[in-house]
Image (cartoon, coloured by chain):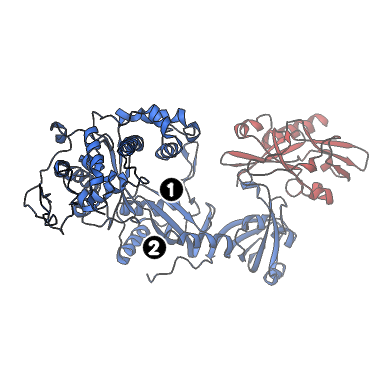
Chain colours: A red, B blue
Amino acid sequence: ADVKGRPCEDFCVLQHSNRRVAICVITLAEAHPLLQSGKTIKNINYQISANCSRLQNKVSGKSKRGAQFLTELAPLCRISSSDGEEYTIYSCIRGRLIEVNENILSNPALLQEKPSTEGYIAVVLPKFEESKSVTQGLLTQKEYEEVLLKRRNSAS
Amino acid sequence: MSSLTEKDRPIVQLLLNTGTCPRCILRFCCVGSQMLYRHPHEDLLKDLQEFLKNNQEKEDTVCLDVVDPPCKRMRLEHTEEGPDDLNHNRAIPQIPSVDDGNAAMESSAVKVCNVCLGILQGFCEADFVKKVCQKVNSADYQFTSFVFSVSLPPQLSVRERAAWLVVKQEMRSLGLPLAKDDIVQLKEAYKWIIHPQLSEELGVPADGKSLFEVSVVFAHPETEEECHFLATACPDCFKPAKNKQSVFTRMAVIKALEKIKEEDFLKHFPCPPSSPKNLCDALEIQCNNGAVFVAGRYNKYSRNLPQTPWIIDGERKLESSVEELISEHLMAEFRADSFNFSSSGREDVDVRTLGNGRPFAIELVNPRRIHFTAEEMKRLQQAINDSSDKIQVRDLQLVTRSAIGRMKEGEEEKTKTYSALIWTDKAIQREDIAFLDDIKELKLEQKTPLRVLHRRPLAVRCRVIHTMKSEYLDQHHFRLHLKTQAGTYIKEFVHGDFGRTKPNIGSLLNRTADILELDVESVDVDWPPTLDN
C-alpha cells in the first residue's frame, strides 16, 4: 500500500494511492501545538455549527452518497485544551467526508499518543477528477521538515 | 388432416390468382402433412393447378398423401369421371429439377410469393441448404446436433393477415364462413422442409435443446415500411427504440396486429398484399456454440502477479495476470471468442496461494471445439503448468454451468487459512505471543479498509478468527498461522488500519505491528472434484 504524507501547516494529510482515487486521512502534523508536551485535551467537539455535526455524517453506497462535502477550510472539529486554548482542525483538502474518528472522542489521549495512526481525525475521499490536484497546495514530508527547520532557526 | 377438400377450392383459386406460392396456399388450407411441403414447389404448383381443373361437381376427395420414402415425387391422379380409386399413388422416377431460387423468377408463372416473400420458395430448397452448410462447415465447429433459428422480417405477419382477410371475405361471400383461423405457421412449415435437408447435409440431428446454433436473418428492404402504419394505428404497442434498432420488432408487430380492428387494417393496407419485385435477402448466416466451462484450482507463487490484468488509463501496470496465464492455453485449444474468469474469492497481488490452491472456473464463449477426453485435459493442464512458474493449476476439468454456483457458495461460506509474517516495533519474547494460540473464535469488527474504500461502501464487517498458531522468529518478527471466516481482511487484522479493525494484532500485543508477507495456505472448498493427476 502506498501511503504518502503531505503535511500542511500543522496538519498532515496521508494519502493512499490506489488505482484511480486517492483516499486521504487527516491527522495532526508533528508541529501542531496539541502534540507538544504539556498539553492535555479537555474536549473534542464535532459540532461545527448549529446545523452541522460531523458525527451525523452518513454515507451510503460505493459512491458515498449523503456525505458532507468539504472544502480546504472546512472545519472538521474543535479541540479545547485544559489551558483554555481552542484549536480548529481543518480539512485541508476538498472531498467527501467519509468518517470522523470516534475513537478519539472516547479516548482523547489517542490523538496525542498516536496522531498518525489510531489518533487520526477524519477520512476524506476526493473527487475522482481532483485526486491528483487535491494535494498540490500541500507540502511534501521533506518540504515540511525544511519549514520546521526554518522556523526553529528564526526562533532562536 | 392431409388432404385438400372441395371447400378449399375457392381458397386455392383466390390465392393462386393473387400471387401466393403453393406452400403458403397449403398452409392457409391447414394442410398438416409435413412431407407434402417438401415437394419441389414447381410440382406443388402443378398439383394445385390440377386440383383446380377437377370437375367442380365431383365430391371426391383428392388425396395428396405421400408414400413412404424413398419416393421423391408424387403424381396426382387426374380423374374426369367415375369413382376411380383415387388412392393409388404412383411414384414416378424423375429427377426433380434443381432450381436456383432466382431461376424460378424467370419462369413467367412463378412470382415472388406475396405472403412469404420467397421464404417458402427458394429459401427452403437444395441450393440454400447447400449455402448454409457450406458456411457451417467452413466455420469449423465441433457439434453433435444443431438448432436452426430463423429471423423473419416482421412485415410477413402483416402480409399474412392481409391475405387471410381477403380469404375470409371471399368465403363469407360464398356462404362458407370459416371457423377460427388455424393456418399452419410459416416458421413451422419452413422448419418442416429445411430441417431434414440440413440434418442430412450436416450429418447430425436437429435438436431444439442443442448448444450449437445456426442462425439466419432474413430481410426484405423493399417492403420494410409496410409495418409503419401500425405505429399510427396502435401507438402504445411500439416502445421507443433503444440503441439504433428499429421499433418494429416482430413481437411489437404481432401485438399490434392482435389489437388492430379489421376495418382499420383494411383501410391502411392493400388486401390482398401486392406481389413484391424481389425475394428476401438472407443476411448473415451465423454459427454459435453454447459456452463450455473449465474448472480447476490454481496456486500462485509470485508476489508480483495480479489476478486480473492491472491496467490504469490504458497502461498496464504489471505484466500478465493469473487469469491470462491460465486462459491463454484454453482459448487456443477451445478456439473460443472470449472468456470469463471467476474464482472462489481472490488474493492481493503480493499474496501467494499455496496448498491445494484456489478454485476457479473459466467460461469459454462460443468455442469451436467442445469435446475433450480426460487425457487431453490432463495434457492441457500440463501445458499450462509448463508455461509458467508463477502459477500452477490442478484438477482441470470440464464442468457444467450449474457447478459455478457451488464455487461461489464457497466464497461466502467456507473458511480459509493463512500464514502471515509479522513485524513488531517493540521487542517481543516467546511468552508475549504464546497466548495467541489459545484464542478461539475471536470476533472482529472491521470497517471497510482504507485501501478499498474508494470502491466499496463504508460498512462494519463482523468476522471471526477461528484459530491461531504463532511461531516465534526473533525479537521483532513472528509468523502467525490463522484460520478465518470467509471475507476477513487479514492485513488489516495485523496492522489495525488506523484502529478501524478491532481488535488487531497491535492491540492484542500492545505494540505497533505490521504485516510483511502473507500467504494463503488453503481455501477450504471441496470443489471442483479432485482428480488423480
Q: Image quadrant for the C terminus of chain B?
A: bottom left
Question: Could you tell me the amino acid type at mark 2?
Answer: Leu
Q: Are marks 1 and 2 on the same chain?
A: yes
Query: Badges 1 and 2: C-beta atoms under 8 Å apart?
Result: no
Q: Amino acid at mark 1?
A: Ser
Choose between A127 and B226: the one closer to the eye: B226
Residue A71 image point, x, y percent: 73, 31
Tally of numbered discs: 2
Q: Earlier in the sequence, mark 1 or mark 2?
A: 1
Is residue A114 something that shows in the picture?
A: yes
Q: Which mark is residue B67?
A: none
At x 19% / y 52%, what residue is drawn?
A: B61
Q: Nearer the viewer, residue B282 or A67?
A: B282
Residue farthest left in this picture: B93
Please indicate, yes or no, whether residue A108 appears anywhere in the rendered image. no
| Residue B320: assigned label | 1
Could you tell me which secondary element the residue under label 1 belongs to? loop
B237 sits left or right of B8 in the view: right
In the rendered image, which quarter contains the N terminus of chain B?
A: bottom left
Q: Dot 2: what SS?
A: strand
Residue underneath mark 2? B396
Pointer 1 chain:
B
In percent of width and height, residue B412 lies at 58, 60
Say which quarter of the image contains residue B530.
Answer: bottom left
